[in-house]
Amino acid sequence: MYVYIIGGFLGSGKTTLLMKLASMYSKRGVKVAILVNESGEIGVDGATLKAEGYDAVELPDGCICCSLSGTLQSALKNIKRDIDPDILIIEPTGLALPHKVRELVNISMIDPDEMYIIGIADIQRFDDLIKRKEEFFKRQMFAADFILINKSDLATPEKMKAAIQWLKAEYPDKPMIPVSTKTGENLDKIYEMMK
């Protein structure tokens, strides 16, 4: 089983990416399970995902990397037992630290074949996020296997270039991909990187 953890601040486009990935895998005939951690965010909840035909588990209010760690571990075991997916996509809240979620998946006896963290940066709010929450943003992104700079359809080339330069200075070894989860721009590059 492959596990993908989607990390990013509130409103960065995690849920939209999750839906695109789940759809891509479903079209390939791959069995996908989705674990979402809603924490008062406006987004797609477990019931909506289930209505779309996905095996979705929703964790209640709280953060799966701290107050819900036991709940997460129990949910992971149930997913493995009841669904046994080829791919598990985890969307923690926008306040979670993805590397903490990875640690909890590692100790919950899921035994993934491979685990990846996808970091998402919102280009529209990038400057403000760096100004107000720089340390938190860095902690969210440092364990990402690659970083998507989302909402590229709404950014000027200059703004995108500046964000990429900042990210490359912080994370020189990580692939950076400007994308638009809304329009689908460059999502094919993400699909190529995934199993």
Image: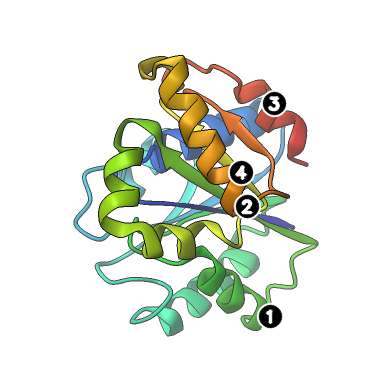
Q: Secondary structure at mark 1?
A: loop
Along the viewing direction, whichever of 10 and 112 lies nearer the viewer: 10
Q: What residue sits 61% from the left and 31% below the top?
A: 177
Alpha carbon distance from label 3 to label 1 = 31 Å
Q: Amino acid at mark 2?
A: Tyr
Q: Are marks 4 and 3 in contact (CB under 8 Å)?
A: no
Of the image marks 1 and 4, the number of the one nearer the N terminus: 1
Residue 68 location (% of width, % of height): 37, 78
Q: Secondary structure at mark 3?
A: helix
Along the viewing direction, whichever of 152 and 53 lies nearer the viewer: 152
Determine which of the numbered discs, if any, sits on residue 171 in the image. 2
Alpha carbon distance from label 4 to label 3 = 18 Å
Determine which of the numbered discs, if any, sits on residue 168 in the image. 4
Q: Amino acid at mark 3?
A: Lys
Q: Amino acid at mark 4?
A: Lys
Of the image marks 4 and 3, the number of the one nearer the N terminus: 4
Badge 2 density bin: few <14, some 14–19, many ≥20, Cα 10 Å:
some
The quarter of the picture where the N terminus appears is bottom right
Residue 93 location (% of width, % of height): 35, 58
Badge 3 density bin: few <14, some 14–19, many ≥20, Cα 10 Å:
few
Q: Nearer the viewer, mark 1 or mark 4?
A: 4
Alpha carbon distance from label 3 to label 2 = 19 Å
Badge 4 density bin: few <14, some 14–19, many ≥20, Cα 10 Å:
some
Alpha carbon distance from label 4 to label 2 = 5 Å
Of the image marks 3 and 1, the number of the one nearer the N terminus: 1
Q: What residue sits 67% from the left and 59% below the top?
A: 84
Q: Which residue is mark 3?
A: 189
Q: Amino acid at mark 1?
A: Met
Q: Which residue is mark 1?
A: 109
Determine which of the numbered discs, if any, sits on residue 159 in the image. none
